[in-house]
């Protein structure tokens, strides 16, 4: 089976369309050419497709292609991981031979996953020193996966006597999630909850925060405060803000401003 045939089979097995597999990284035309054997993917593209299909890159290599010297090691590490032997997977991965452009990305990803899972198990067993060691060693893999780095830091915070201030400084901002939750709360008319979430946002200069604050005050019929926030959000969300600002200024008795924002909607 050729690389293209394996890719087509894996995509169909995963129940994914070409558009779903491509995402924003490659074109459907390019994917179609690869699947039909009229084009070959770069190693970067192959790693992306393999990750999307949850397959090792080696799965797609042609049978006559040279295997990575780390092939057996990675198969052992994957097997240990899948069986729940996370500490064993972590130790096996330490024997990885560099450089290896074929399996480097998977090694990095699985090392971080194994280290964190082994540390979590160690914490549950009261082996705090071992857990700290695992999490500190796993830091070397953090830069390639910010979301997993967040989980690593949260695990590290559970270790007794952890440097909480240092951990908090390195944690990614929660602003995006807070804004999403606040927007959902507003849509459900949970005003108090939305207000609490918006108060916790760190960057209060961003357009989204001002837009939601404007909607919050508008719902409370505090039109002056609503208008102030909506005008700050206007450069980013003009089409959304215009009708809301028209309402604010009409309620404030500023009919000239209300008329201006009515005109912007035409």
Image (cartoon, rainbow, N blue to C red):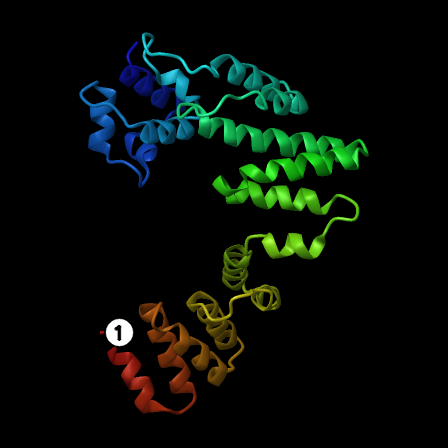
| Outermost residue, front side | 98
Q: Nearer the viewer, residue 47 or 29?
A: 47
Q: To which residue does mark 1 refer?
A: 265
Q: Is residue 81 above or below residue 192?
A: above
Taking 217 as reference, is 234 left or right? left
Q: Is residue 260 above or below residue 124?
A: below
- On the image, the x and y values in percent for residue 129 come to 77, 36
Q: Residue at image x 74%, y 48%? A: 162
Kind of element beneath mark 1: loop
Q: Residue at image x 36%, y 12%? A: 66
Q: Nearer the viewer, residue 229 or 81?
A: 81
The quarter in which the N terminus is drawn is top left
Q: Residue at image x 40%, y 16%? A: 59
Taking 156 as reference, is 109 left or right? left
| Outermost residue, left side | 38
Label 1 CA crowd tier, 10 Å (few <14, some 14–19, many 20+): few
Q: Is residue 22 above or below residue 95?
A: below
- On the image, the x and y values in percent for residue 51 come to 42, 29
The quarter in which the C terminus is drawn is bottom left
- On the image, the x and y values in percent for residue 30 come to 22, 30
Taking 72 as reference, is 44 left or right? left
Q: Is residue 117 above or below residue 220?
A: above
- On the image, the x and y values in percent for residue 171 come to 59, 52
* Figure disc tally: 1
């Amino acid at each position: 089976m050729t690389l293209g045939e394996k890719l087509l089979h894996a995509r169909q097995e995963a129940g994914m369309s070409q558009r779903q597999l491509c995402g924003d990284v490659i074109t459907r035309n390019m994917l179609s050419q690869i699947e039909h054997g009229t084009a070959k993917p770069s190693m970067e593209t192959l790693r992306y497709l393999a990750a999307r299909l949850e397959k090792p890159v080696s799965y797609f290599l042609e049978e006559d292609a040279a295997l990575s010297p780390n092939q057996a090691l990675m198969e052992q590490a994957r097997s240990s991981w899948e069986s729940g032997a996370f500490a064993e997977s972590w130790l096996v991965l330490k024997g990885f031979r560099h450089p290896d452009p074929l399996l480097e990305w998977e090694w990095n990803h699985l090392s971080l996953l194994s280290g964190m899972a082994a540390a979590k198990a160690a914490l549950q067993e009261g082996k705090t020193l071992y857990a700290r060691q695992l999490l500190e060693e796993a830091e070397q893999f953090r830069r390639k996966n910010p979301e997993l780095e967040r989980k690593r830091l949260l695990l590290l915070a559970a270790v007794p006597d952890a440097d909480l201030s240092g951990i908090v400084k390195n944690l990614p901002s929660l602003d995006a999630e807070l804004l999403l939750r606040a927007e959902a709360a507003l849509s459900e008319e949970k005003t108090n909850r939305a207000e609490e979430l918006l108060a916790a946002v760190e960057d209060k200069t961003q357009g989204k925060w001002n837009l939601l604050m404007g909607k919050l005050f508008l719902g409370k019929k505090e039109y002056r405060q609503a208008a102030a926030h909506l005008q700050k959000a206007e450069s980013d969300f003009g089409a959304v803000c215009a009708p809301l600002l028209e309402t604010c200024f009409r309620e404030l008795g500023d009919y000239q401003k209300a008329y201006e924002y009515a005109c912007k909607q035409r």
